[in-house]
Amino acid sequence: MRTTIGWQAERPGDALRRAPLERRDLRTDDIAVRVDYCGVCHSDLHALRTLPEGAAAPLVPGHEFTGTVTEAGRDVTRFAVGDPVAVGNIVDSCGVCAMCRRGQENFCHGFPTLTYGGTDRHDGSPTLGAYSREYVVRDRFAYPLPEGLDPAAAAPLLCAGITVWEPLQALGAGPGTRVAVVGLGGLGHLAVKLAVALGAETTVVSRSAAKAEDARRLGAHDLLVSTDEKQLSGARDGFDIVIDTIAVPHDPADYLRLVALDGTLSLLGHLGPVEVQTMDLLLGRKRLSSAGSGGRPATASMLEFCAAHGVAADIELLPSAQVNEALARLGRNDVRYRFVLDMSDLA
């Protein structure tokens, strides 16, 4: 085993504390990555709040990170020591099911191995995340970080970015399509940037007119205030794709009314139960969908696209020692639009 330093919690509600962590020795197809930057995701906050009492292992969050290869297993040919890399929230899958064969490891029938809170497929050990100075990962689930992408601002692309990229691609966002993005947070601001870069006419839907300036800065063509019934009525049947990034339970009916004939509402924020009236789908042959994370081919293509089009997250960079402050502020939605931790203070 090898030892590194990270931030962990042992009980629900605990503040993260600095502690030594064990990483496995490299297998033949592993790389060791010095973690340079790690994004702070709402799912990290949720995991810390719901950590089971008496869990078998401490929780080390972090599943969107960039860093540098420091060692490679003997069978690794894609990476060399010194290469900049990016890693997301999936670090392994069965590799043989229908989804894995299609490059959709995020939908692996055997369930993908998560970067933290998961179970290693080989030795059964719990996975510990990237709020740490080193991570050991199977090389197939690491991605070259393209030249031109700032490594700190690129880190959130590996979770928030790919989460909105896959449905935008699957639903055909591009020139001649009209996209509405509901909610302008960590997911939403990247959905706007990517939809605009793809060439779609893009509108932000927000509860607050105060977001109009930010929406324009991100490239959106318009902003609809969701609490203004007149504005919503005027936009009825107006969008081919509606990307809903709201993270709390809500009624999707208002946003289904925005969907055009044969268009789609994709729910990406709140993944719990929803109630939908069939008539809201029937009137316009509308579709309801969802998505989560992304497969290896999509993740690689997203990074190349982002590098080519200058797309990265709007971030607030903090030293990792301020991780608890970042999580507290995230719980208050006090961030525009993603916290990223600089892990160099763990050296």
Image: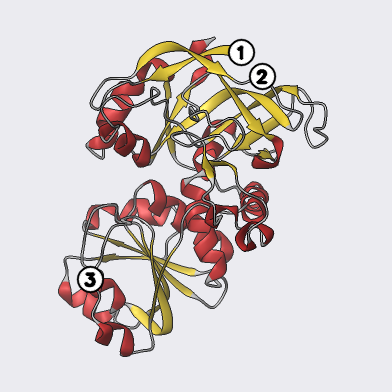
Which quadrant of the figure contains the N terminus? top right
Cα distance between the residues tagged 2 and 3:
48 Å
As displayed, is residue 168 above or below residue 339? below
- In the picture, measured across the screen, residue 191 lies left or right of residue 98, that is left
Residue 196, visible in the rendered structure: no
Amino acid on which the number 3 mark rests in the picture: Glu
Q: Position of residue 4 (x, y in %)?
A: 55, 13
> Which of the two discs, 1 and 3, labels the residue nearer the N terminus?
1
Q: Which residue is mark 2?
A: 25
In this view, the residue in front, 130 or 333, is: 130
- Judged from the image, the secondary structure of the residue bearing numbered disc 2 is loop
Callout 2 touching callout 1 (CB < 8 Å): yes
As displayed, is residue 227 above or below residue 328? below
Badge 2 crowding class, 10 Å Cα cut-off, few under 14, some 14 to 19, many 20 or more, is some
Residue at figure coordinates x 49%, y 36% from the top left = 63
Q: Nearer the viewer, mark 2 or mark 3?
A: 2
For residue 2, the mark is: 1
Which quadrant of the figure contains the C terminus? top right
In this view, the residue in front, 293 or 312, is: 293
Q: Position of residue 111 (x, y in %)?
A: 51, 50
Q: Position of residue 110 (x, y in %)?
A: 54, 52
